[in-house]
Image (cartoon, rainbow, N blue to C red):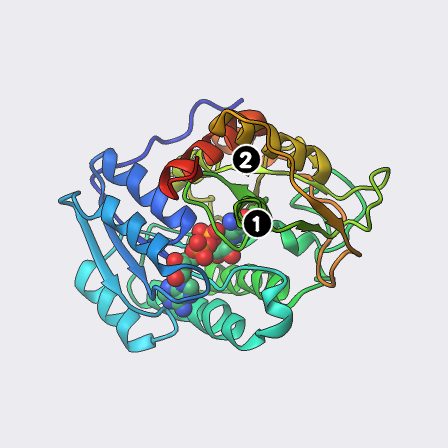
């Protein structure tokens, strides 16, 4: 493992887009705790409960070096002004319309935020040079690829959702800008991120909501446990540590574009059913009584992929780190937070 990577530089100004979002919040907090200056932008949209976004922001506001702007990355003039005013050294673009299934019914939001919004960030980085642009891609770019683990060198030209197509487009656009305008850029393919204060649209959160609502949970795996879906579930702290380590380590340029993509995933895929039974156990422990979800099995949904499994060799080589949190630990932190936050007994 490479231990010679550059450590976080707390004299820099970091722009975090999507700062009120799940990953953006935790990253901003970690940077602020280490004395960095953080400029956060978020449009606080209502894709999921806005109260949760405000609750995250409340935790960031006490930091003196935190500045928040409510705004949309698809607003080119606003992004230009923000770059001119704050002159960020390092930009982390996490603002996006997330969610695979939602993209089937609501394509507009994906083009607006993920394509136009990201283009505005690239243009701003071109006109106001930055030391490193780090941006969120997704494991969904691997589509229905069969070869596992997924490696960054695998072909990813066959996305199965518009969400995945926008993320793959981001990688192509970043590569071009890096090549033409010498913008050092790193694209991060996150693998199913979970944790306290996570996204209510994600399965583990929704299952917990359903349990307390007295409703059955729907599991989209055909009820076929022998061929169950596999997911590389990655705990939020591991994602944040991976991003943090990469921030001061932009890819080298030379003759090639200074652009690289990295998987950040647990590299230890779990069967969906194992994840669900672990969630039941963790919730039982949080509540000190036995929890068993009522389950309904349904066919796999369009856009969903059968397996995700990250190779983390490239990340390890670059910054000497790979995600390590076991689902037993990560889900326990989630259920403990959930019961406290929503006052469940
Ligand atoms: N959580 C995961 O499992 C996962 C997996 C792969 C990739 N990602 C990617 O990581 C990034 C962060 O994901 P997250 O889980 O924190 O999602 P999130 O939805 O919690 O955070 C995104 C934030 O961006 C904001 N936003 C959306 N569109 C915007 C716009 N046009 N302008 C300004 N703000 C906007 C939203 O209000 C939200 O607060 C996203 O790009 C997502 O696609 C997440």
Rendered view: 200 above or below 73: above
Numbered label tally = 2
Look at mark 1 in the image and give the residue it sits on. Answer: 210
Residue at image coords 74%, 63%: 302
Q: Which mark is residue 284?
A: none
- The C terminus lies in which quarter of the figure? top left
Residue at image coords 38%, 67%: 45
Mark 1 and mark 2 lie on one chain; the one further toward the N terminus is 1
Look at mark 2 in the image and give the residue it sits on. Answer: 315
Callout 2: CB less than 8 Å from ligand 1: no
Q: For label 2, count other residues whose C-alpha is less than 10 Å away and answer few (under 14), some (14-19) or many (20+).
A: many
Rendered view: 256 above or below 166: above
Please provide percent x and percent y for residue 98.
52, 60
Q: CA distance from mark 1 to mark 2?
A: 36 Å
Q: Is residue 21 visible?
A: yes
- The N terminus lies in which quarter of the figure? top right
Rendered view: 223 above or below 162: above
Q: For label 1, count other residues whose C-alpha is less than 10 Å away and answer few (under 14), some (14-19) or many (20+).
A: some
Q: Is residue 187 visible?
A: no
Please provide percent x and percent y for residue 205.
53, 46
Please provide percent x and percent y for residue 146.
81, 47
Please provide percent x and percent y for residue 4.
42, 24
Q: Is residue 170 left or right of residue 117?
A: right
Q: Quadrant of residue 314?
A: top right
Camera-nearest label, 1 or 2 = 1
């Amino acid at each position: 493992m490479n231990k010679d990577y550059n450590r976080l530089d707390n004299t820099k100004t970091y722009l975090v887009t999507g700062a009120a979002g799940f990953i953006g919040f935790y990253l901003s907090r970690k940077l602020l705790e280490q004395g960095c200056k953080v400029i956060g932008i978020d449009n606080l949209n209502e894709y999921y409960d806005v109260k949760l976004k405000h609750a995250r922001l409340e935790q960031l506001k006490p930091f003196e070096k935190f500045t928040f702007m409510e705004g949309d990355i698809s607003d080119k003039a606003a992004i230009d002004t923000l770059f001119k005013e704050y002159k960020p050294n390092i930009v982390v673009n996490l603002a996006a319309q997330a969610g695979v299934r939602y993209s089937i019914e609501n394509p507009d939001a994906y083009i607006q935020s993920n394509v136009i919004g990201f283009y505005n960030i690239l243009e701003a980085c071109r006109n106001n040079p930055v030391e490193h642009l780090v941006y969120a891609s997704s494991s969904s770019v691997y589509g229905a690829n069969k070869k596992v683990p997924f490696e960054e060198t695998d072909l990813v030209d066959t996305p199965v959702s518009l969400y995945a197509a926008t993320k793959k487009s981001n990688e192509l656009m970043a590569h071009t800008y890096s090549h033409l305008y010498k913008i050092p850029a790193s694209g991060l393919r996150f693998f199913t991120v979970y944790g306290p204060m996570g996204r209510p649209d994600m399965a583990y959160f929704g299952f917990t909501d359903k349990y307390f609502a007295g409703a059955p949970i729907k599991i989209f795996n055909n009820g076929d446990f022998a061929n169950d879906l596999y997911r590389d579930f990655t705990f939020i702290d591991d994602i944040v540590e991976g991003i943090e380590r990469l921030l001061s380590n932009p890819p080298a340029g030379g003759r090639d574009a200074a652009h690289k993509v990295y998987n950040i995933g647990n590299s230890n895929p779990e069967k969906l059913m194992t994840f669900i039974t672990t969630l039941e156990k963790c919730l039982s422990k949080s509540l000190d009584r036995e929890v068993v979800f009522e389950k309904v099995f349904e066919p796999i949904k369009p856009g969903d992929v059968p397996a995700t499994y990250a190779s983390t060799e490239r990340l390890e080589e670059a910054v000497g780190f790979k995600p390590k949190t076991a689902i037993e630990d990560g889900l326990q932190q989630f259920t403990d937070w959930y019961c406290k936050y929503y006052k469940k007994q």
